[in-house]
Image (tube, helix red, strand yellow):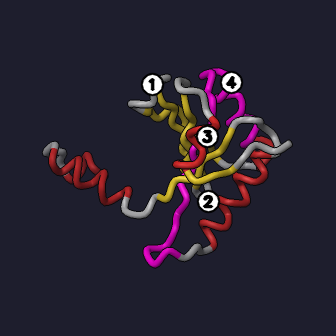
Amino acid sequence: MPAPILPLIDAAPHWPERGALVGLDLGTKTIGVAVSDPNRRLATGVETIQRKQFKVDAARLLAIAAERNAVGFVLGLPINMDGSEGPRAQSTRAFARNLANLTPLAIALWDERLSTAAVERELIGMDVSRARRA
């Protein structure tokens, strides 16, 4: 049976109280991979995968999840500001469906609208230079 694919708020009950989550930022050429600590307070970037074929990419993601004893995945879902879903969001959903067929770990979709702006504000608040923010 494929893993469930749910909004983040609905995925949480499918995961144990503690355990690392693998965060994925799907691009057209790369996949950014971050893994949280077991308490899910801090995530650290661990790898950028150069996209090849889905099976190759998925095998690497599943290996990372196994190495880190992950209990689930979180994928950024690029929803448009008006709430509609464009081609990138559809591509992300398709990737999640395909990954769900290869793992029992629940997959959460995170609405990433304004997440870049929020991080930018935090970095400005920490007085990080424009060059370092880029």
Q: Circle 4 is placed at which residue position?
A: 66
Mark 4–mark 1 contact, CB under 8 Å?
no
Instruction: Give the distance between the C-alpha atoms of the residues marked 4 and 3, in whole angstroms.
Output: 12 Å
The residues colored magenta run 57-83
Task: Say which mark, if any, is on residue 28.
Answer: 2
Quadrant location of residue 68?
top right
Label whose residue precedes the other's in the sequence (1 or 3)? 1
Q: Residue at x 59, y 74 (%)?
A: 86
Residue nearest the viewer, comparing 30 with 88: 88
Residue nearest the viewer, comparing 36 with 16: 16
Above or below 101: residue 79: below
Instruction: Give the distance between the C-alpha atoms of the residues marked 1 and 2, in whole angstroms.
Output: 31 Å
Residue 79 in the image: state x and y as whole percent.
52, 68
Q: Residue at x 64, y 37 (%)?
A: 14
Q: Indicate the amino acid at tag 3.
A: Phe
Q: Secondary structure at mark 2?
A: loop
Q: Secondary structure at mark 1?
A: loop
